[in-house]
Image: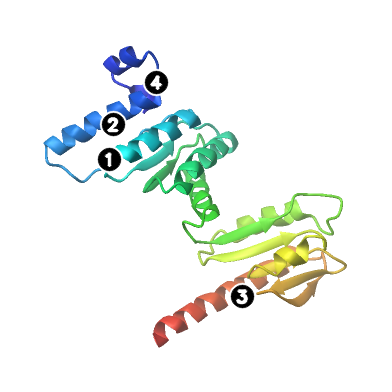
């Protein structure tokens, strides 16, 4: 950790650097190797994104042990999420890292959620709903932000991987909706696509309730289909 470097390394480098972090880590690796203890992983965390990324890149070139990623003491929920997504995303996209920790000054449950969302965005893990949603704009035919906020909370319990698009207008809506398991396109009325095909029109009244029901139904069908495939094989 950049905040707890050995005193001689602080004196040698003058300040925490990527090189100092790696030198410190290699000391510990050498010590454990000398004791014939192979079951460990190595981390070189820093709160500075660039320092952490540089240190992990250097470390990955010189050790064979698993690497634990983290942007330490990243900050509050919003700022820490951004810093973690940027730093960890860069490394994971390069194939660096075996485990990770998102460090937030927030509810630890949020750390897990952010970590999984980072992995989902890079297609390294598939669990739960992957939402595609547009920002608020004058073309929207329903309140996209309110709809998304409610859906995210309601569907947290679903673990089956499912792509869901919530688009407020017909400009971008059909294109996005046709590429996912469940897609909602704003219109008069709104149109729902299931696996790329238009299947149902929804009014804004009880929109979230109806959409939640369709998503849960599609999730159940996917689970049943996967179970049947396992049985046949």
Q: Which residue is mark 1?
A: 63
Q: Label 3 vs label 1: CA separation?
A: 47 Å
- Seen in the image, is 112 located left or right of residue 203? left
Give how far across and how far down residue 24 sits, in percent: 28, 27
Q: Secondary structure at mark 4?
A: loop
The numbered mark at residue 16 is 4
Residue at image coords 61%, 71%: 216
Q: Label 3 vs label 2: CA separation?
A: 50 Å
Q: Secondary structure at mark 3?
A: helix
N-terminal label among 4 and 1: 4
N-terminal label among 3 and 2: 2
Residue at image coords 41%, 87%: 232
Kindly report which numbered mark, 3 or 1, lies closer to the viewer in this rendering: 1
Q: Which residue is mark 2?
A: 25
| Along the line of sight, the residue nearer the viewer: 187 or 25 | 25
Q: Label 4 vs label 2: CA separation?
A: 13 Å
Answer above or below: position of 123 versus 114.
Answer: below
Q: Quadrant of the C terminus?
A: bottom left
| Along the line of sight, the residue nearer the viewer: 14 or 149 | 14
Residue at image coords 36%, 28%: 1
Q: Which residue is mark 3?
A: 217
């Amino acid at each position: 950790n950049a905040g707890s470097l050995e005193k001689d390394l602080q004196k040698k480098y003058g300040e925490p650097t990527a090189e100092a972090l790696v030198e410190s880590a290699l000391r510990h690796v050498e010590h454990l190797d000398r004791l014939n203890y192979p079951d460990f992983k190595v981390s070189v965390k820093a709160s500075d994104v660039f320092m952490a990324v540089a240190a992990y890149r250097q470390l990955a070139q010189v050790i064979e042990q698993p690497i634990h990623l983290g942007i330490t003491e990243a900050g509050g929920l919003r700022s820490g999420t951004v810093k973690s997504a940027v730093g960890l995303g860069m490394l994971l996209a390069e194939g660096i890292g075996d485990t990770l920790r998102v460090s937030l000054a927030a509810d630890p449950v949020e750390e897990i959620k952010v970590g999984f969302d980072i992995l989902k965005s890079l297609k390294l893990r598939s669990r739960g709903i992957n939402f595609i949603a547009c920002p608020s704009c004058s073309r929207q035919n329903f309140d996209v932000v309110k709809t998304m906020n409610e859906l995210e909370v309601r569907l947290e319990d679903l673990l089956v991987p499912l792509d869901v698009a919530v688009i407020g207008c017909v400009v971008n809506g059909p294109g996005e909706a046709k590429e996912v398991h469940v897609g909602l396109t704003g219109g008069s009325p709104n149109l729902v696509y299931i696996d790329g095909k238009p299947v149902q029109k929804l009014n804004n009244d009880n929109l979230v309730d109806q959409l939640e029901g369709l998503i849960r139904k599609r999730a159940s069908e996917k689970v049943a289909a996967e179970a049947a495939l396992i049985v046949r094989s």
